[in-house]
């Protein structure tokens, strides 16, 4: 069975920021409901890595939600190659997950500069300090 939200969007609501697969998004109607967009098809997004609120509402590992009820927490996506804005492009990695309601990104495939900080194979960084590598 598919988990569905109960709240409806008000008539005339306009989606300002389009959502894309790989982004962490929250529900406009209920910000405590959030997750990672896996795919978007026919105006509906499939989300995984769901918030506790969605799990408490009976959603399992995934749910579907109309894209007009979703807003991305940031423009960053899983798979993006990013660098630490505070340290420069030599300090980089690839996003593999989001935590803390999308405010923190998990990074792998770390540059030698990041590994040199003692991070090992993975690290986590606030999305506010990350920029996509050009």
Image: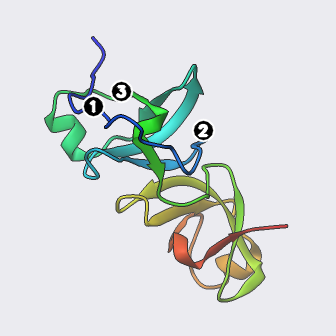
**Residue 71 numbered mark, or none:** none
65 or 112, which is in the foreground?
Answer: 65
Q: Position of residue 104 (x, y in %)?
A: 45, 66
Residue 85: image quadrant is bottom right
Q: What colour-coding does the image apply?
A: rainbow
In the displayed orientation, state which residue is furthest to the right: 134
Q: Position of residue 100 (x, y in %)?
A: 35, 62
Q: Is residue 88 above or below residue 94?
A: below
Q: Secondary structure at mark 1?
A: loop
- What is the quadrant of the C terminus in the image? bottom right
Q: Secondary structure at mark 3?
A: strand
Which residue is labeled 3 in the image? 63
Q: Are marks 2 and 1 in contact (CB under 8 Å)?
A: no
Residue in the picture at 19% in, 44% down: 53
**Residue 8 numbered mark, or none:** 1
Disc nearer the start of the sequence (2/1): 1
Q: Are marks 3 and 1 in contact (CB under 8 Å)?
A: no
Residue in the picture at 16% in, 33% down: 57
Q: Is residue 108 above or below residue 68?
A: below
Residue in the picture at 33% in, 41% down: 50
Residue 75: image quadrant is bottom right
Crowding at dot 2, Cα within 10 Å, few <14 / some 14-19 / many 20+, comes out as some
- What is the quadrant of the N terminus in the image? top left
């Amino acid at each position: 069975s598919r988990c569905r939200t109960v709240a409806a969007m008000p008539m005339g609501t306009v989606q300002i920021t389009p959502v894309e697969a790989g982004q962490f998004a929250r529900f406009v109607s209920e910000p405590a409901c959030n997750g990672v967009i896996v795919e978007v098809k026919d105006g509906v997004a499939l989300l995984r890595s769901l918030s506790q609120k969605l799990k408490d509402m009976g959603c399992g590992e995934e749910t579907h939600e109309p894209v007009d009820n979703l807003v991305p927490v940031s423009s960053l996506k899983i798979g993006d190659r990013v660098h630490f804005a505070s340290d420069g492009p030599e300090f980089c990695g690839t996003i593999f997950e989001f935590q803390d309601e999308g405010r923190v990104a998990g990074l792998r495939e770390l540059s030698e500069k990041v590994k040199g900080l003692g991070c090992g194979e993975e690290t986590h960084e606030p999305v506010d300090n990350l920029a996509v590598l050009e």
